[in-house]
Amino acid sequence: MSKAASAQSMHDPNHTGKDLNYCHSLKANVKAQSGRGATVLVAPVDHACTLRFRPRIMKLFTADRKGWLRRNRALLDSDRRARPKRYQVMAKSNMADCNKHGPVVEQRVREVSGQVQTPTGFAIRSFDRGSMAEPCLIGQASREDKDFTALPDYSPSLIMLSHRTNCLKVDWNGRPLDLRDDPHGYLLHPEEVTLASTLRLDCATYLTSKRRIFQRRLECLRIDKEFRKTDAQKACKIDVNKASKMWTAFKAVGWLDVSFMRQFL
């Protein structure tokens, strides 16, 4: 920056009297330090320019908190809606490369596709931290599965959980989900709330997955088939590790016994 530009910045009308006094004081201090042989890393010109930049984020946020929240939520919603389109573009690109470059790229596509299914059938990596998944056939994932009222309820009575502490406790790495304000929390037994919170499932998703598990349990009973953990994984539309944990918890309290299903035959 030239001396003329420096002088203009020092006398800019945007500076207050306090800023100008600070600039003159700083300039005198730097000059004194230079006279004593000290190394000056920042020139007063740079300090004068820096004074022109003042953050206004908090001021704007305080002026319209609700508007700020609405705008940020709109950005998040827009990003979420755009994700499936990005996966489709990535999938088409992968398939084009596969057709162009042959078996090497085809093998890489198969490796990626074998990780986690997406709404379009192609792979993304899950960020939920849990135990290693057991070998199983992973079903194609879909949109959020929360409409539990659309499914029949073959679940055993919650009375079985009365006076039983930690009966649905499972191990899961990660911080539990706070469900104290969940609108469907009243439909769950406190032990079920703990289970859903541990697996980081909101109450609607937990109820939907629970009903899917017992619906599949009844189907297996009708064809005289043993109801295994992989059956629960296929029935649910959540992370297979979480479905496995739900199967384990239900089996521990006896909910998977045939006696609870015979009334629906």
Image (cartoon, rainbow, N blue to C red):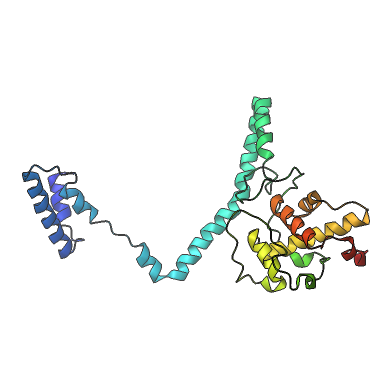
Q: Quadrant of residue 216?
A: bottom right
Estimate the x, y position of residue 105 in percent, counting from the top left: 65, 29
Horizontally, is 174 left or right of 187 in the view? left
Question: What residue is drawn where x is 65% and y is 72%?
Answer: 183
Please, is residue 140 above or below residue 154 in the view?
Answer: above
Horizontally, is 265 left or right of 71 in the view? right
Q: Is residue 225 visible?
A: yes
Task: Report the front residue among 56 and 238.
Answer: 238
Please, is residue 169 above or below residue 183 in the view?
Answer: above
Residue furthest left in the image = 35
Task: Report the front residue among 162 and 192.
Answer: 162
Please, is residue 157 above or below residue 33 in the view?
Answer: below
Question: What residue is drawn where x is 70% and y is 68%?
Answer: 165
Estimate the x, y position of residue 13 in percent, counting from the top left: 18, 61
Horizontally, is 59 left or right of 37 in the view? right
Task: Report the front residue among 240 and 139.
Answer: 240
Question: What residue is drawn where x is 76% and y is 51%?
Answer: 233
Estimate the x, y position of residue 39 in percent, counting from the top left: 14, 42
Estimate the x, y position of residue 176 in percent, counting from the top left: 60, 61
Q: Quadrant of residue 160?
A: bottom right
Task: Report the front residue among 68 and 251.
Answer: 251
Q: Is residue 237 visible?
A: no
Horizontally, is 156 left or right of 16 in the view? right
Q: How many marks?
A: 0
Q: Quadrant of the C terminus?
A: bottom right
Question: What residue is drawn where x is 62% and y is 67%?
Answer: 179
Q: Quadrant of the N terminus?
A: top left
